[in-house]
Image (spheres, helix red, strand yellow):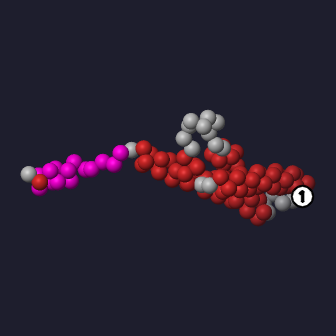
Amino acid sequence: MAAAATRKMLAKPRRSTLPDPLGIAMTDDERAWLFANTVGLTAGLAGWFVCAMFASVAYNWTFYYLLALVVSGRELTRHRLFAGRAAQSAAARPASVPAAYFRRLVSSRA
């Protein structure tokens, strides 16, 4: 599930008119590398499950390494996506001045 979520977050928008918040926080090379890493780890996890059917490695440490690497890729992508969305919304939103500061500014000029 974590690998599928990562690949979904890494995908670029289908239409070029839609914003790409991950493009702000991650380069295309990083995105391609993380996508390939996720695909490779998914294959490794599937291979581990096949081997676990025929050997007694059900609770071996290698499973937890693969699982942790898959989940860390998802969390890295999620945090970068949140940072990109925050930067995108900050750029789209005009800067505002708090009302109390604005009143002091106006009253000091009068």
* Nearer the observer, 35 or 65: 35
Residue 81 location (% of width, % of height): 56, 50
Q: Residue placed at 17% from the left, 54% from the top? A: 105
Q: Residue placed at 61% from the left, 35% from the top? A: 15
Type of the residue with mark 1: Ala
Drawn side of residue 104 relative to residue 87, left or right: left
Disc 1: CA contacts within 10 A as few (<14), some (14-19) or many (>=20): few
User: Which residue appears farthest toward the bottom when viewing the image?
Assistant: 61
Residue 48 location (% of width, % of height): 83, 55
* Nearer the observer, 71 or 13: 13
Q: What residue is pinned by disc 1?
A: 55
Report the magenta stretch's main SS.
helix
* Nearer the observer, 2 or 49: 2
**Could one spot residue 45 in this view of the protein?**
no
How many marks on residues? Answer: 1
Residue range highlighted in magenta: 94-108
* Residue 69 covered by magenta stretch: no
